[in-house]
Amino acid sequence: MTLPLTDPAALAEALIACPSVTPATGAVFDCLEAMLAPLGFTVSRFVDGEAPEEPVENLLAVRAGTGPHFAFAGHLDVVPPGEGWTSDAFRPERRGELLYGRGAVDMKGSIAAFVAAVARAGNETGPLSLLITGDEEGDAVHGTRALMRHMAARGVTPDLCLVGEPTSVNRLGDMIKIGRRGSVNMWITVPGMQGHVAYPHLAKNPISPLVRILAAIEAIVLDEGTDWFQPSNIEITDLHVGNPATNVIPGKATARLSIRFNDLHSGASLTERIGAIVAAEGGTLDAKISGEAFLTPPGALSALVSNAIEAETGVVPELSTSGGTSDARFLSALCPVVEFGLINATMHKLDEAVALPDLEQLTRIYGRILGHVQTAC
């Protein structure tokens, strides 16, 4: 069946109909490639990751032209649907003005809208690329970062990048993201010596030093925020001893932290700071930096997107750095990047759905952006 490339709803349905729980491979990428090839894109697909990890597929599609190179980035993987959907999560269904299905909002809908916008624009654009991963909802190890290495090997360097994450809150266009906080998770281990509670001199209780560590961490005020970022925050997310006996001093105690931080900090500096507190009490610290904070200061790219939104909807979007992380944290190393897409109210929820009028309006907004890229460089 030939897909109607200018119809974002039909394209979204085709993508939703391909189950693609993270890490995504295969059919959903076949579907997107079938949309892009007739539009003149050269499509390169590759799989990254080896056993025992599950492989991740990534797609780079490039179309030549003159002028600034504009990239659209996104992901085809989705979170598991869960139990309790009204209809099959991977069988798209229109009910009234809503299109239901896993990924309708996050973010197969915005990918469909961008493809439809390109189809409507015809050849009246400059150089374009789509950077699409199958590993955004997972660990993001074999996704966009691998895709960036793939791009570098082929000399693909965009001048501007738009990530189609669902950034809108109450109505389409009310928010775009110009940055994101960084994220680091930390695991604290305090060793002890197991023993009988009646003979504490023959044992070493790890709980007391762990409590002191956590109290010191809780007392930290990282910052008061910046012009564009809210204050950084440390959250204790787990505390574990695993001692079922009432008369035994445990041999180990552990805790886990999650820190979301603004651009006054780095993952390494926070790890060093917390590590010093832990080491002073005889503990050890392991850390995993999920991403650094980044900011694309208001300028030509945010103006390009904001003007397109206002022209189409009458809404002046808020420029924000709120929320969690996205793959824009990696792409910001390549060029200025902002995020804009659908209303995020149903993402990751049962009966995820996109309003069909929003899908059409998003396509028109993306079309306006494509028509004015030259003015942003």
Image (cartoon, rainbow, N blue to C red):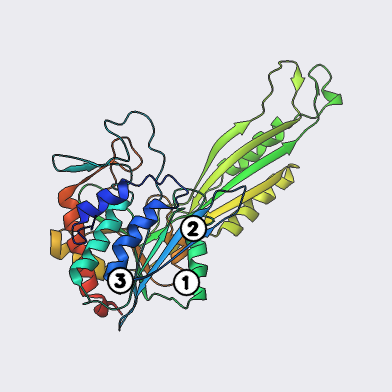
Q: Nearer the viewer, mark 2 or mark 3?
A: 2
Q: Is residue 214 left or right of residue 334?
A: right
Residue position marked by numbered label 1 in the rendering: 151
Quarter of image, res 196: top right
Q: SS at mark 3?
A: helix
Question: How many angstroms separate mark 3 from mark 1 (CA)?
Answer: 21 Å
Q: Is residue 193 visible?
A: yes
Residue position marked by numbered label 2 in the rendering: 143
Q: Residue 333: x and y, percent?
A: 47, 69
Residue position marked by numbered label 3 in the rendering: 301
In the picture, which quadrant includes the C terminus? bottom left
Task: Note whether 230 is above or below 198 in the view shown.
Answer: below
Amino acid type at image mark 1: Met
Amino acid type at image mark 2: Gly
Of 201 and 104, nearer the camera is 104
Quarter of image, res 203: top right
Q: Earlier in the sequence, mark 2 or mark 1?
A: 2
Question: Farthest residue in the right direction?
Answer: 202
Of 366 and 223, nearer the camera is 366
Q: Residue 4: x and y, percent?
A: 19, 58
Q: Is residue 220 left or right of residue 180?
A: right
Question: How many angstroms separate mark 2 from mark 1 (CA)?
Answer: 12 Å
Q: Earlier in the sequence, mark 3 or mark 1?
A: 1
Amino acid type at image mark 3: Leu
Q: Is residue 275 left or right of residue 174?
A: right
Count the labels in the image: 3
Task: Note whether 87 is above or below 330 in the view shown.
Answer: above
Q: Earlier in the sequence, mark 2 or mark 3?
A: 2
Q: Residue 192: x and y, percent?
A: 78, 33
Q: SS at mark 1?
A: helix
